Amino acid sequence: MADTDRTRFDRRRFLGAAGAGAMFLAGCTGQSSDDEVLGNPEFTDERPEPGGTTMEELPELSGELTVYSGRSEERVGELIDYIEEMYDDLTVDVRYADSSDLVNAILTEEETPADIYYTTESGTLTFLRDEGLTTELPDDVLELCPEEFRDPEGNWMGLSRRSWAIAFNTDRFEESDIPEEIMAFPESEVASEMGWAPYRGSTQAFITAMRVLHGEEETREWIEAMLDAGLRTYEGGRSDLAQATGSGEVNASLYNHYIVRGNLDLPIDVTYTKNDAGVVPVVPGACVMNASDDPETAANFVAHWASAEAQEYFATTTWEYPVSPHVEPLDVLPDRDELAPPEIDLNDLADIETTLSLLRELDVL
Amino acid sequence: MPSFTPSNTKRDPSETNADEESTLPIGLTLLAGAIAAVVITPVLWVLFVALSVDPESAFSLIWDTRTRTVLTTTTILIVTVTTLSVLLSVPLAFLTTLTDLPGKRLWSVVLALPLVIPSYVGAFAFISIWGPKGIVQGWLSPLGVESLPAIYGLPGTIFILTLYNYPFVYLTTIAGLRAFDKTFLEAARTLETNLVSAIRYAVLPLIKPAVTAGALLTALETAADFGVPTMMRLDVFTRVIYVQYNSFNLEYAALLSLHLAAIALVIVVIESQVRGHDAIHGEARGGSRSYTYRLGRWKWPALALCSTVVLFTLVMPVAILFMWLVHGPVAYAGGLEFDWEYATNSVSVSLLAAGVAAAMALPIAYLSAQYDSLLGRIFERATYLGFAIPGVVIGLSLVYFGSRHVPSIYQTIPLVVFAYVVMYLPLAVGSTRTSILYINPRLTEAARMLGSSPIEAFRRVVFPLMIPGVVAGSALVFLHGMKELPATLMVRPIGFETLATFVWMVEGNAYYGYAAIPALLLIFVSGFSILAVLPRDDEDPRLRKLRRLLPGREDSRDPNDEFIIDSSDWGDLPTTEGRESSTDGGVALSLDGVSKRYGGEPAVDEFSCSVPEGELLTLVGPSGCGKTTTLRLIGGLERPTSGKIRLHGEIIADETNGLPPEERNVGIVFQDFALFPHKTVAENVAFGLRAVEKSERETAIDELLSLVGLSEYADHYPAELSGGQKQRVALARSLAPKPDLLLLDEPLSNLDAGLRIEMREAIREIVKTVGVTAVWVTHDQEEALSISDRVAVMHGGRIEQIDGPKTVFTSPDSRTVAEFLGHANYLPAREENGVIETPIGPIAPARIATDEYRASSERLDILVRPDDIAIIPTASDAHGRVVYSRFNGPEVFYRVALETGTVVGCTGSHDEWIERGTAVRVELTASHPLRSFTREDE
């Protein structure tokens, strides 16, 4: 809930509020915003032209594609519609649902009608690859994405990037109050006022990263110590953790960096730890299903998401870091250089089974 | 007087179609079985998947400590929510039905409305308001309140689920309270000064089936709810299942779902035990009187209770939605526009599901309500399983079947509709079943006796009466469909957005401003369907008025030419001569060794008699003597186990064959009248006259109504008539098709004592006027003796004696007959020297009616009725002393202890009063021969 008593009014909040009024009217009256501009017009104006391969340089698309999208319509719907409208002979059907719904459906379906699976974090991509349900992407498509954000076997590629982050209530904490190392949290004053959402796949990926980087034993101790300190569990996903952080129910949380985007009315800011699991990248990406009737078109469609325009869209509209080095993230976010992610093979994050048993052992799940 | 057993609600064979228990209708059973199989299949798939888990890990998962904790939590949650729902609903239902609560009609709508609010919206609102840092804390913060106590966990979950699930109990309880006979409550209140005990002893037992039916749904809905426990962070099965589902351990998710299925089974079994199979219909006398308890100063607390509930369940979530609306979205969401199509999608899919569910529920509900059979129960209860399985699991199951076996409907609207049906069919089944149970089976029988085939009777009587129940069930399915989310997400066609999926999408990403409009729309649209769910108050005169105005009432239809009968003598029906010609002394009805057994016990045993044309025969006997069964055998409502029944010489039933009731041309008047409540008096009378041309039919109706003296009431509904008037309508209705034979089943026992005497004369008069042969069943010997041409006294399924009223009374064939027909004194006697010595002196043998005593001259009992003797106070030669006296008005009843020890009852004039203890002489005053019986061994 918006808390009208609060007087804090930073630039983020101002921009957001201004944009909100206009968008709200558009949203309710059914008029779409200016069709010429892809993405949030609030942030597209003062930015340099995005670099890298443009959509026009990519092969033309035609035919029918079915996309199972674990990313929601309000995040990527505009982009997908934009690509579909570029080509007269292209029809794209998108099934939006939670990633887990879609993966369960793919596993249950006799032969999935999906050509492309698109998701918020790479874990399920690795999972589907390991189940033998995906097909290799052509090299020219894969090359649109830096190696660190794609499957070494070439079955999936990242299309944007988020970072795991520490969100904090700015009424309560200064950025300097937050430890720079994730492993130092249990001893800090922040720990007793923190929340997390261990049911969410991304939190599980964070724990997986910690296991990979610091070993299982240290991870277990870290979780226990955090719980002892008073770490509170939230469902996550329904934005409850963000609300709780903003309202002061807790004053800090383990979250994705884009928490600030959806909660401009709340006194929330984010900060990053360095070179550890606390800043592990979360990579939304896509793969082509081997049941696809037209894997070539499907792969080229995925390529469009890696194009300059699409990367710009992710930067301005979903407030993510583009995977393309030729497109800059939004000014309000820390520079890419400020981010010091650990070195890690994203496919290692797919081993959530071990993480789940660890969490269950600790009575977290 | 024979003991008068008030008609209790104990199961009598006709009540539950026990006759046909062994012979379920094959077609209906197969249909119901097929439907149950179709909807249970997705649930069975869960079992199938669960079985693929290797047994060891399956066991450890099913029975580890954690699962047990979850089981305990889930159980506590279900039990507490259900109990609290009952505790909340019953008082609310009572207040809004039986009291003078201001605005109670409005309250009853508003109090049912929480059902339309998706519980996830309710929970969200609740947390926003009452959370540790919610709105309330915001208000309190100036007072230094930094944080409210955490509401998460079991108590909060119980609180929210109770608030959103209690309306199930509330709705069924209202229905129960409206249907039951309020005279019980009045009676109880005269006995119990205290209202609370009146409710406890009179109302609660009667509404128990209704309360349990609602509690069942509350319990199952609680078991299957995912949103609220998730938001309130409580570990219950739905949430544990979801964790497995999220890590793609479908087998484990399925395995854990079996826990829920098992819980559902337990709930269903418990509910079956509690509710039994009692028919819950009231008497078919017509509407029950309304009853109003004046609240007085309790009005304010009552209003406060209702308002508090509404504040928490409706006002708060809707206020939160309006706040979203006013604040608007705070972040950019391109291409995220609300489209009215989402609303039409929601409505059309939910409507389709409601329609399909109603149609599929019908055979299952009918089978289960009309036939007390194991199969019927299994089919009905099987449908409840889908209600307790989480939507994601059902959705996945349909993904499996859809993509594999019917790819043509995979990801199409029919599959969405089917998903809703699988989950919500029990709502339609329950409501339809209840509505059938509320229909008195006599109504169907009455229709059959008026010439309707079983299907026609269903169409003309049962179906119109169950429509409110069917509509209510469909409306429940509809509003659940409107809210449904997880299964919709799994099986919907690509791009198919409903209000719920849209709310989910935008709310999940904190775009609350976008969620407000669809969420309010969802609540608004579903809100209207609550009006259909609310039990209709048939007492409402406005409704009857409306019905009267409705065009196209059934009886104005053109007759079917094929069936026009010769009705040349309709005109003279009400005259004495009308039937004179046919009263030619021939035998109208004969029964030849007719027996009827229920599971070996004979109800009617070798019954034989014949009834001449135009005779009025009464069957009289104590309760359970088989008289009603005999009547039902004649009518064709039961089939004889052996023997033959002939009407005008033609066999209408024997041990193998029987004409169905509608082909016998036999009319019947039931004890509880069984007037069709949805038809006017004229329509009731016209019911059996469908084959008659319109003008003649109208003439006939006019004549019959004037015959029974109800011409002015032609357009009234049965509920507007008094008992005597209803009985006269029932009589006119049964006479309308000009039956060869009229059956009257205790026609007067539901009337007041004074009216009873008046009515028995009137009915006899009418029967004789029309000249129809009639068989009249009664337990009242005075009634039998006063109106009959002949009386058949029955006992133990047999005729003890059949004779004219005077003969059976004064010259009974057996002690049973003698005792049944009135107070019987037996004077012990023996013959000595040509005279018969008795305690009141010698009697000449010539005065003894039978020659039976000659065979056993030693020991006799002479039957002496109280008015056969007189007592005279005397100083000397007394026979005994008065030991008891009772002033009865016109006469005084005395008991005299004779010197021999025998006690005899006798009557004396009210003119004279003899004190107890007075020595009296007993004199024989009767002039008719006295009946005697061989004395039984002492």
Image: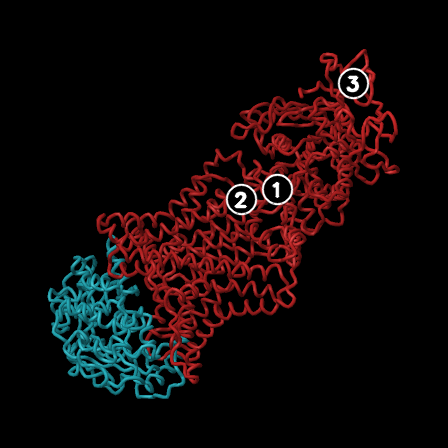
Chain colours: A cyan, B red
Frontmost residue, A56 versus A16: A16
Q: In which quarter of the image is the N terminus of chain A?
A: bottom left
Residue B766 locus on image (x, y percent): 76, 37
On screen, A163 above or below A170? above
Q: Distance between the residues labelled 1 and 3?
A: 40 Å
Residues tagged by mark 1 and mark 3 found on one chain of the structure? yes
Q: Which amino acid does label 1 sit on?
A: Asn
Q: Of callouts 1 and 3, which one flags the residue occurring earlier in the amino acid sequence?
A: 1
Residues tagged by mark 3 and mark 2 found on one chain of the structure? yes
Residues tagged by mark 2 and mark 1 found on one chain of the structure? yes
Viewer-nearest of labels 3 and 2?
A: 3
Q: For the residue labelled by badge 3, is the local secondary structure a helix, a strand or a loop?
A: loop
Residue B5 locus on image (x, y percent): 65, 38
Q: Distance between the residues labelled 2 and 1?
A: 13 Å
Q: What residue type is labelled 2?
A: Asp
* Circle on res. B761: none
* Circle on res. B8: 1
The residue located at (46%, 61%) in the rendering is: B165
Q: Mark 3 and mark 2 in contact? Answer it, CB < 8 Å.
A: no
In the picture of the structure, the residue carrying the numbered disc 2 is B278
In the picture of the structure, the residue carrying the numbered disc 3 is B849
What is the chain letter for disc 1? B
Frontmost residue, B16 versus A141: B16
Give the crowd class for mark 1: few <14, some 14-19, many >=20 residues within 10 Å. Answer: few
Frontmost residue, B809 versus B609: B809
Give the crowd class for mark 2: few <14, some 14-19, many >=20 residues within 10 Å. Answer: some
Q: Which amino acid does label 3 sit on?
A: Ala
